[in-house]
Each structure stands twice: as structure tokens, then as C-alpha cells.
Image (cartoon, helix red, strand yellow):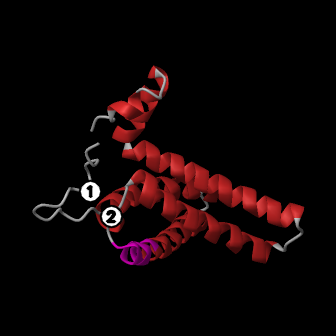
Amino acid sequence: MALRPEKMTSQTPARQRIMEFLHRSPFLKFLIVGVLSFALDLGLLVALHEGLNVDLVIATPIAFLTSLVFNFALQRSFTFRAMNSRTVSAAKYIALVIVNVVVTDLIVTGFDNLDWAYGIGKVVATVLTTGWNFLLYRHWIFRHEPARDGEPSPDTEPAP
């Protein structure tokens, strides 16, 4: 999909190339949003616990849940530009989060029970969940519904 001419004139060539690359790279956008979500989670945790002296048992879920909402909103609007039902997407997202927590716990504790480094288990779990999260976000949670006759496809930009 090409950028519209009026947008192209307001950007430097380097910025234009970056924006075109991002537009064509949903996996890169997915990773960027993931990193930002992690940074928000960790930053809010530190701010609440260290800065405001909130107990970890309270600060940890507040930071984690805030980052989940942030991640959902950005993946939906920025990465996948979803046009499907927000409620249905949110229900699917919550179900996937639960599966990811269970699978991660099983892998990390499994590594530990085998006397392998649990940190390696966490890396393995993160790589696995990142891979299937991208595919499930793209094809299940934020899936574009096929356009009906006479309606523009959600994958195309409206004409200028």
C-alpha cells in the first residue's frame, strides 16, 4: 500500500522509508509494541514500589494489568488496525493471556524440576509465546472480517 502524496511531502526521505518499512512489517510493529509494553510494566512497577512504596503484591498486578491493556490497545489499533468487534477481541485476548500464563508457568517450573536453569525456561517460554501470539493476534484476535460487496476492505486505505 502506497502512502498518500499529501503525507509524503511532510516527511523526510529517511522517515518516509522507515514509515513504509513499518507499514509493511506487522511483526516488527508487534515486537515494538511488546517492548513498549514490557517497559511500561517494569517502569510502573518500579515507580509504584520504589517511588510510592506500594507493596509488591499490589504493585506487580497493577503494573502487569496496565501493560496488558496498553498492549491490547496498541496491537489492535497500531499493529493490526483491527476492525472487528472490540469486545470479541478482548475476550479472545484475555483467553490467550491465561493460556500464556499457564504455559509459561509449566515451562519454567518444568525446567526447574529437571534441574535446568529456570531462566532458560523463561526464555524458551517467551520465544514460544511470542511466536504464537503474533500468529493468533493476526489471524484470530484481530482478524479482519472479509469485506462485503460495496464496502472497502479494512486492509486498504480510503481514497484521498
Query: Does residue 89 show up magenta in the picture?
Result: yes
Task: Quadrant for the N terminus, please.
Answer: top left
Q: Which mark, by number, is residue 83?
A: 2
Q: Residue furthest left?
A: 149
* Image quadrant assignment for residue 153: bottom left
Horizontal side, residue 83 vs residue 118: left or right = left
Residue nearest the viewer, comparing 87 with 52: 87
Q: In this figure, which residue is indicated by the disc labeled 1?
A: 154
Q: Residue at x 33, y 64 (%)?
A: 83
Asked if 100 appears above or below 39 in the picture, the reply is below
Q: Which mark, by number, is residue 54?
A: none
Q: Residue at x 47, y 29 (%)?
A: 10
Q: Earlier in the sequence, mark 1 or mark 2?
A: 2
Q: Residue at x 66, y 52 (%)?
A: 39
Q: Residue at x 52, y 46 (%)?
A: 32
Residue 125, image x, y percentages:
50, 59
**Badge 2 density bin: few <14, some 14–19, many ≥20, Cα 10 Å:** some
Residue 3, image x, y percentages:
33, 35
Residue contact between numbered discs 1 and 2, judged by CB atoms under 8 Å: yes
How far, Cα to Cα, is label 1 from label 2? 7 Å
Q: Residue type at mark 1: give it.
A: Pro
Q: Is residue 40 visible?
A: yes
Residue nearest the viewer, comparing 65 with 16: 16
